[in-house]
């Protein structure tokens, strides 16, 4: 019944003049065999360290492969984030039907070992959001050499800030106005500059860490040259042409995301 309902809903919104959805943005983090993080994941500042909560961002390689197979089997078209942004800005007339954008956050080495090979073999583009502080730090994160290899192979490498902090003003009451401005400049501009220096390609997009974003952060991101920004919500959002590129909501795909849940993220 649900696919029929969705089809009728989309038809009705078209008749009423509302913008029909055109794409889904998916958000991944770490993908490893068995779905067990090889190293401990730490929570954001001020959040209790609950292993089960932190580990929810690690998806099993088996589930990831099943999801990609589903996209292939059911006629979904994985497109680049830049294609979606161009469409939203009117620089692209249309998107393929059942469009999906795949993004990966943080810079875990699994993006190099597992995610990239699977997507490359399927000719599916993806955007990798990294933050320089973590690159080349320990065995579970990408090195700058691997980042450069991915960029050379066509992976879209973008910014996840410099140190992956909470960004909104309310989370930094100890900072005065000048200090907060300097903080945002470091996190937004200097991360952009650092990544560009290693990839040789422009950084145009940002994923807001912990999905902590407000209008002030969006305005700062735009001022430093970002053309689009993404964040997660469990409810997600199907993207229409009315969405603002600097504030694009993604569906987070987590450890406990079953295939039936995954299907609900997608256009019918």
Image (cartoon, rainbow, N blue to C red):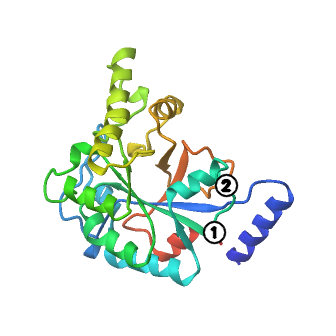
CB-based contact (under 8 Å), mark 2 and mark 1:
no
In front of the other: 15 or 131: 131
Q: The C terminus is located in which quarter?
A: bottom right
The outermost residue toward the right is 15
The residue singled out by tag 2 in the image is 240
Q: How many marks?
A: 2
Determine the secondary structure under disc 2. Answer: loop
Mark 2 against mark 1, which lies toward the viewer? 1
**In the image: residue 179, left or right of residue 236:** left
**In the image: residue 232, left or right of residue 186:** right
Quarter location, residue 53 = bottom left
Within 10 Å of disc 2 (Cα), the crowding (few <14, some 14-19, many 20+) is some
Quarter location, residue 132 = top left
Question: Percent position (x, y) of residue 127?
Answer: 42, 58
Q: Give the answer, above or below, for where 85 lies relative to 14.
A: above
The residue at 26%/75% (across/down) is: 33
The residue at 31%/42% (across/down) is: 164
The residue singled out by tag 1 in the image is 96
Within 10 Å of disc 1 (Cα), the crowding (few <14, some 14-19, many 20+) is few
**In the image: residue 27, left or right of residue 97:** left
Question: Percent position (x, y) of residue 191?
Answer: 32, 39
Question: Percent position (x, y) of residue 183?
Answer: 33, 26
Q: Give the answer, above or below, for where 195 lies relative to 107.
A: above
């Amino acid at each position: 019944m649900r696919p029929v309902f969705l089809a009728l809903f989309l038809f009705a919104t078209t008749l009423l003049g509302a913008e029909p959805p055109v794409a889904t943005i998916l958000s991944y983090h770490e993908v490893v065999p068995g779905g067990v993080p090889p190293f401990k994941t730490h929570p954001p500042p001020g959040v209790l360290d609950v292993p089960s909560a932190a580990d929810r961002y690690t998806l099993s390689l088996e589930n990831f492969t099943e999801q990609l197979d589903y996209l292939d089997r059911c006629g979904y078209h994985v497109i680049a984030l830049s294609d979606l942004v161009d469409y939203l800005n009117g620089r692209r007339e249309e998107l393929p039907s059942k469009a999906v954008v795949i993004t990966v956050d943080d810079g875990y080495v699994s993006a190099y070992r597992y995610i990239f090979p699977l997507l490359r073999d399927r000719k599916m583009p993806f955007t990798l959001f990294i933050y320089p502080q973590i690159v080349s730090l320990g065995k579970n994160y990408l090195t700058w050499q691997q980042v450069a290899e991915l960029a050379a192979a066509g992976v879209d490498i973008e910014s996840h800030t410099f140190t992956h902090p909470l960004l909104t003003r309310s989370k930094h009451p100890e900072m005065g106005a000048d200090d907060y401005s300097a903080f945002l400049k470091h996190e937004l501009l200097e991360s952009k500059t650092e990544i560009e220096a290693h990839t040789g390609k422009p950084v145009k997009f940002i994923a807001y860490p912990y999905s902590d974003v407000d209008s002030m952060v969006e305005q700062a991101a735009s001022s430093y040259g970002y053309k689009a920004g993404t964040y997660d919500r469990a409810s997600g959002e199907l993207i229409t042409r009315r969405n603002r590129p600097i504030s694009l909501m993604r569906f987070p795909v987590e450890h406990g995301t079953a295939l039936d849940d995954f299907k609900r993220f997608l256009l019918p």
